[in-house]
Amino acid sequence: MRGYHGRVTSPGPAELPGFDPTVPSEARVTDSFTGGKDNFAADRELAKLALEIAPELPMVFQESRKFADRAARFLVDAGVRQFIDVGCGMPTPDSLHHVLRPVAPDAKVAYVDHDPVVVAHGRALIDITGPVRFVQADARDPDRMLDHPDLTRIIDLNAPVAILLQSLLTVIPEDDVATAVVRRFIDRLPSGHGYLLVTHAVRDIRPEVTAELAQLYQEQGTVKGEHKENVRSWKEVEHFLDGLRLVPPGVVPLPDWRPDPGEPTIDTSAFWVVGGIGQKP
Ligand SMILES: C[S@@+](CC[C@H](N)C(=O)[O-])C[C@H]1O[C@@H](n2cnc3c(N)ncnc32)[C@H](O)[C@@H]1O
């Protein structure tokens, strides 16, 4: 995919989704799991069905937030002051710029989502003269997204930068599209000081649970694209970071990724979301 330019998706119009409260949206369903108020009846109904399949979901989201916090502090220690959070979801008190404020008050954050509700809520909460932007763009079109004027106003891709794909690739089921998107993001990162973070649900740990969740989200029209029986495998997720220097301990269940000293450990034998960071050589 080196040198690829353009939208990497199946044929069809390059449209950003509109607002339809009757179709559950990934961002609003996630919001309802994490105690947010920015969701509608259809979102809460899907969240209820998902919880019946996987009662551990609130814990999984809580651990994802803790991982994001540790990863952000690791990246700051590595010298990164620019972050592109792709598929950021609804703004919350734990959103990245809040986590960064005590450790890197000068950090710039471009939040990207294709969901207009996410972007509208985000923009209502931020000071548009500050170092934070909400960008409405489609990650399936990486160049258009990275060259969006709302993003380039604060982000310089020649300086240290991290692209964060937290649970984004899980909702891009087509393997060729997801791979092409990731390759293009890596192409655009600066050598030596560009980082890619990926988190992803995997089918290896509790295959029946992830398969049922995948079916539910696809049937409800929340996850679009090619219909898949289950989410990707751990190995497939590791392959997204091919060609990068893997930050130790690699791609592991989120709670096992560089836990803070003294942080209570949890049994991760049944934890089905993995994540890791790669540095562009
Ligand atoms: C499962 S949620 C994850 C939200 C957040 N990153 C987290 O980890 O809690 C996926 C998010 O990606 C967004 N999204 C899905 N496909 C996208 C695309 N092609 N371009 C941009 N955003 C997308 C959804 O609107 C949603 O906010």
Image (tube, rainbow, N blue to C red):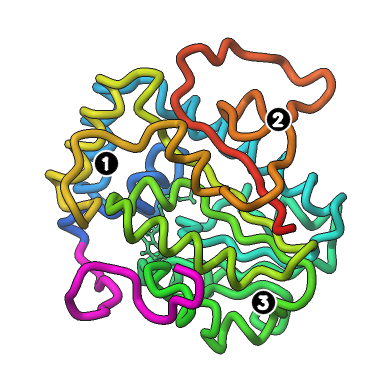
Residue that mark 2 sits on: 249
Choose the circle earlier in sequence order: 2 or 1.
Answer: 1
Image location (x, y in percent) of residue 125: 58, 68
**Quadrant in which ligand 1 is drawn:** bottom left
Q: Is residue 59 left or right of residue 180?
A: right
Quadrant the N terminus occupies = bottom left
Pointer 3: what residue?
127
- Kindly identify which numbered label has been placed on residue 146: none
Query: Where does label 1 land, which residue?
Result: 44
Q: What kind of element bears circle 1?
A: helix
Which element type, helix, strand or loop, lies under badge 3?
Answer: loop
In the image, 242: left or right of 77? left
Q: Identify the residue at image location x=71%, y=53%.
A: 279
Residue 26 sits above or below residue 265 on the image: below
Q: Range of the magenta residues?
A: 1-20
| In magenta stretch: residue 10 | yes
Q: Is residue 144 above or below residue 64?
A: below
Q: Nearer the viewer, residue 158 or 93?
A: 158
Which residue reaches farthest left? 219
Residue 32 in percent (x, y) is at 38, 42
Front tag of 2 and 1: 2
Q: CA distance from mark 2 to mark 3?
A: 37 Å
Position of residue 149 relative to residue 138, above or below, is below
Q: Amino acid at mark 3?
A: Asp
The crowd level at tag 1 (other Cα within 10 Å; few <14, some 14-19, many 20+) is some
